[in-house]
Amino acid sequence: MRFFRPLPLVSAMALAFCGVAHGQSLLELYDAARGFDASYQSVQAQFEATRLKSSQAQAKLGPTGSLSVNLSKNNINYDPKQGSSNYDRFYGTNAATVTASQPLYRPADKAEVAQSSLQMQVVQEQLAAAEQELMVRVSQAYFDVLAAQDTVTFVQAQKTAVAEQLASAKRNFEVGTATITDTREAQAGFDLVTAQEIAAQNDLQVKKLALDQVVGKTGTQPKSLAVKAEPSPLNPSQVDEWVSMSAEKNPTLRQAVIGLQVSELETQKAKAGLKPTVDFQLSHSLQNSVNA
């Protein structure tokens, strides 16, 4: 069962991608990152541990039962020195006891159960915050690659244009309509854009490696944005409403509010430790004696 919130932002952005062959969408890479990222996996493990701890706390208020069995046997062997023959005799006792108990009044345990329930809410908010943080990191790395690809495409187009200018300057110099200075300036411009192309390609490789590291895959290829992407309108559309929603649903703020309640229950649990407890117990015993 998943307790964290849905991801409308990622779902909306995924609709803006076209189907590039052998490419991965933002949602595909995000799902891969969720199964690989150590920080996110750590929060998930903490969530599972807290869930089990909550079940243990609730079990303290449930009924308990026990069964005890006692078997005893004594042997008597008589060996007279003269006259009569030997004989054996034994006697024993079989006993069984069944006991059942149901807590009726345990204020400390009750406070612990309430506290564990709030701690579950805390880790749920931590999981939601970790999911949002991972979403931001994957999206940032994803769009960094797309931006770097656009830069390479732009520089390569610029290089093509500068190459044509260089070729034109050389032709003009050969026919005498341009000076050697014009040719050298064109050559310098071509060398500059060539260096810019190398830098852009290196930056693209760095961005791709960063994305691979986030999602735990090699050779990732993000899908390009659709030419006519139309994102869904914001709902609500007013900034004030978003601010109000963030104040109510922000995972960090909710953790702080719930953490205060957990601390208050810790005080109640300490005070309840001085109060008496009441349990209902039922016990039934059976005993049988055997002689032979």
Image: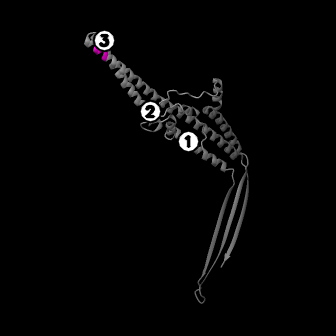
Q: Mark 1 or mark 2, which is nearer the start of the sequence?
A: 1
Q: Image quarter for residue 188? A: top left
Q: Is residue 173 above or below residue 59?
A: above
**Element class at badge 3:** helix
Q: How far apart are the alpha carbons under marks 3 and 2?
A: 42 Å
Task: For the C terminus, give its image quadrant.
Answer: bottom right
Q: Residues within 10 Å of mark 2 (few under 14, many from 20)?
A: some
Contact check, label 3 and label 2, Cβ < 8 Å = no
Q: Residues within 10 Å of mark 1 (few under 14, many from 20)?
A: some
Q: Which mark is residue 229?
A: none
Task: For the N terminus, give its image quadrant.
Answer: top right
Magenta region:
167-171
- The verdict on residue 169 being magenta is yes
Residue that mark 3 sits on: 182
Q: Which mark is residue 210?
A: 2
Q: Position of residue 260 (x, y in %)?
A: 66, 35
Q: How far apart are the alpha carbons under marks 2 and 1?
A: 23 Å
Please state which of the two labelled residues, at mark 3 or mark 2, is closer to the viewer.
3
Q: State left or right for residue 14 relative to residue 258.
A: left
User: Which amino acid type is marked by label 2?
Assistant: Ala
Q: Which mark is residue 44?
A: 1
User: Which amino acid type is marked by label 1?
Assistant: Gln
